[in-house]
Image: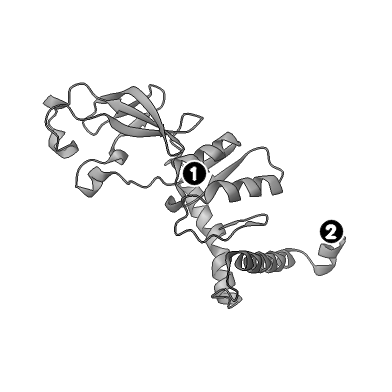
Amino acid sequence: MQAQAHRAEDVTNEVTDLHQLANVALEAKANLELKEAEVVADAGYYNAAEVSRCVEQNLTPYIPKADTSANTARGLYGKSQFKHDAAKDVYVCPAGAELTYRFATYELGRELRYYRASNCKQCSLKSRCTTEQGQPDDHAGGERTPDGSDGGADAAQPHKFKLRKTLAEHPFGTIKRWFGYTHFLLKGLAKVQCEWSLTTLAYNLKRVLNLVSFEKLMAMVG
């Protein structure tokens, strides 16, 4: 993972990006000496606990929230079909009914808020919502962050994700295709981290030299 505009990079041997968001985002924020900033990442980085860490440090995350609902896998309405009304703190189901807040729990570094509607038995869409008989269980639809949001992407700002693709994907393509650097030469996490740090340093220096002359760069760092 690499944060652009200033060197903040890391290498991990974890198989997913679920726990990689906050550390690099906070490092980039510190390096740039920012009081607040926006963080844009792909859906693989979405993790409510990581989002909470960002929000607590004045970082606004924009991450597409993956639909991991078991209902979606079964062909039923998943969590993404229930829209949260932040002003009223209710979820609105596909039938238009409001699910009101009932209680909250705290699990695996995230707060889970549970909501329920009151007249599901008579709903014409019930068979597409649940296979349970009678009143469905509470809907665990809310993974809330300290600011009250769910940390997911703002659908009204798709340009942020288009911009991310041009900024975040470009360095890796350049390093692989232009540098010919297709694999690590060393073994062991610490050595690979050092190798990657040197690689990103070389990339950033070449980027800088495309913008300013060598003499100007030396004058600025001298």
- Sort mark 1 into few (<14), some (14-19) or many (20+) by Cα contacts within 10 Å: many
Visible residue check, residue 125: no
Residue under pointer 2 = 220
- Residue at image x 65%, y 49%? 27
Residue 88 visible in the displayed image: yes
122 left or right of 87?
left
Residue type, mark 1 in image: Tyr
Tell me the distance, in whole angstroms, between the alpha carbons under discs 1 and 2: 34 Å
Vertical arrangement, residue 53 with respect to residue 19, above or below? above
**Which residue is painted at 72% across and 66% down in the image?**
205
Relative to the observer, which residue lies in front, 63 or 190? 190
Disc number at residue 50? none
x and y percentages locating residue 158 in the rendered image: 45, 47
Q: Earlier in the sequence, mark 1 or mark 2?
A: 1
Q: How many labels does the image show?
A: 2
Q: Mark 1 points at which residue?
A: 62
Residue type at mark 2 is Met
The picture places residue 171, in percent across and down from the top left corner, at 58, 65
* Tag 1 secondary structure: strand
**Mark 2 crowd level (few <14, some 14–19, many ≥20, 10 Å Cα):** few
